[in-house]
Amino acid sequence: MTLYSDSLHRVVVYITERKPLLVGEFKTMTEQGLRNLPARFPGLKMIGSVIHPDRVELTLDFQRLDEDVLRVVQSFKSEVKNLAKKKGFEGDSLWQWQFDDEWISKPSA
């Protein structure tokens, strides 16, 4: 596999109102959600991830996965929100509905 492929996606998921919540215990729950993604979606490869206080940036390889980005992102957001609720998070919405999704493709020659 090359580094650039139509199966690679750069995804950015934002916290509602871009509040800096992904620190401390919330960051730990987010890390757990990320670790669980490949188990939830066999064939999905996590190429990279960065957790910022107000967003999560992911590079995902869908080459061996017959799922769409929306389903994977919704699953991740749902898992983290459920973990947060178990720890006392009372807000209605943790994540913004929209997310950024960009295919990473070969640079033009």
Image (tube, helix red, strand yellow):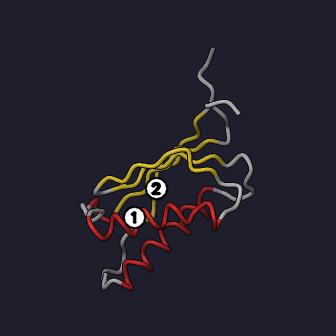
Residue 39, image x and y in percent? 63, 65
Residue at which label 1 appears: 96
Q: Is residue 75 left or right of residue 18?
A: right
Quarter of the image with the C terminus in it: top right
Q: Identify the element where label 2 is drawn.
A: strand
User: Could you say which is closer to the camera, residue 78 or residue 64?
Assistant: 64
Residue at which label 2 appears: 99
Taking the view exactly as shown, the residue that stands out farthest to the top is 109
Mark 2 in CB contact with mark 1 (< 8 angstroms): yes
Query: Hey, what amino acid is under mark 1?
Result: Gln
Question: Label 2 crowding class (10 Å Cα cut-off): few <14, some 14-19, many 20+?
Answer: some
Residue 14, image x and y in percent? 37, 58
> Whole-Å distance between the Cαs marked 2 and 1?
7 Å
Query: Hey, what amino acid is under mark 2?
Result: Phe
Quarter of the image with the N terminus in it: top right
Q: Is residue 108 above or below residue 80?
A: above
Q: Is residue 29 above or below residue 10?
A: below
Residue 96, image x and y in percent? 39, 64
Q: Which residue is pictured at 25% across the width and 62% down the height?
A: 19
